[in-house]
Image: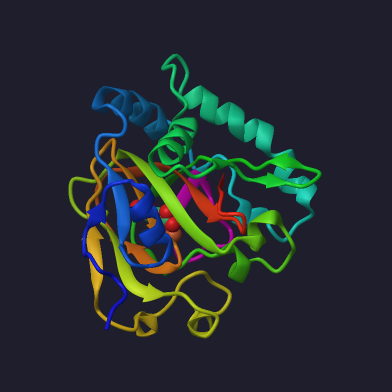
Amino acid sequence: MGNWIRNELCELSAENLDLLLDFKIPGIIIEGFLPRETCDIVADRLRAMTFETYDHLKDIPVHHTGLCHNQWAHEDKSVYFGKKAQAQEVVAGIYRGLGIDPVQMVIDAIARRTGRRVGVFEEPEYGAYFAGAFRSFRGHGRLHADHAPSHIRQPWAVTEITRQMTWNIYYCMHNSGGEVVIYDTIHTAENDKMKVPDDYYFPYEVLDRQDHLKVRPKVGDLILFNTQNFHEILGNTDGHRISQTSFIGLKKDGSLGLWS
Ligand SMILES: O=C(O)CCC(=O)C(=O)O
Ligand SMILES: [Fe+2]
């Protein structure tokens, strides 16, 4: 028996967010969260940029711009926070002249539609994390789960969360491929042992059942899902697939915090 009570992306509401946190639905979508014209301008700028590689994801063909906590989580905290201002400048440059702040728009949408307190994650003594990296996939994003308390062996505020989700706004998509596949199998301390050594991905044998939802995001869509559900991004041969994204952690007080 699977966990999901529906096999589709659902609308953003307080009830559906509770269900998502409880692994009972595959995800949440707001179609056309950003207008197509805005996305096309941002996409042109993104395609012109060079994206950095993630050293900790050897076998996943993904590049990013902005700042990703996972990459610096095992350094002194000052390293990650020392890179924040520059990352924010890059993001501000991408949105120059457009008068939008999509990270704040995501925060506002979740807060308004669910009644939860939502903000950028804070680290005591260091302040706000960076939220809203851009990520580009050029191939198969292999099967994985994202869960800071499992991956990170140093005490950070984000390792205290009780659930982890993600949001993505899609700026360019491939003509074919590039689907995100979310599986109705939850990452646990037990199945974490099956992770490919020294890497971030898992063999398909980790899946408890076949049940999954395969989604081809459209440009401008906002999609949230629970990153403790195993997921993968299907490969492609053409073009760019770039989204802006951050994680969303559930804190013990019931509020939500964003970080990348
Ligand atoms: O690009 C996507 O559709 C999802 C990427 C992903 O693995 C995540 O947001 O955790
Ligand atoms: Fe992920």
Which quarter of the rendered image does ligand 2 occupy? bottom left
From the top left corner, tell me how far across and down residue 57 is, in percent: 52, 62
Q: Is residue 78 above or below residue 249?
A: above
Q: Is residue 226 visible?
A: no
Instruction: Work out whether residue 120 or residue 221 is closer to the camera in this orientation and state it.
Output: 120
Please say whether residue 63 is one of the residues in the magenta stretch: yes
The N terminus sits in image quarter? bottom left
From the top left corner, tell me how far across and down residue 117 is, in percent: 54, 42
**161 relative position to 38: left or right:** right
From the top left corner, tell me how far across and down residue 90 is, in percent: 56, 29
Colour setup of the view: rainbow
Q: Which residues are magenta?
A: 52-64
**57 relative position to 4: left or right:** right
Residue appearing at x 40%, y 58% in the figure: 18
Residue appearing at x 43%, y 22% in the figure: 100
Q: Residue furthest top?
A: 97
Q: Is residue 96 above or below residue 61?
A: above
From the top left corner, tell me how far across and down residue 45 is, in percent: 40, 27
Q: Is residue 64 above or below residue 25?
A: above
> Which quarter of the picture shows residue 226?
bottom left
Please say whether residue 30 is one of the residues in the magenta stretch: no
**241 relative position to 55: left or right:** left
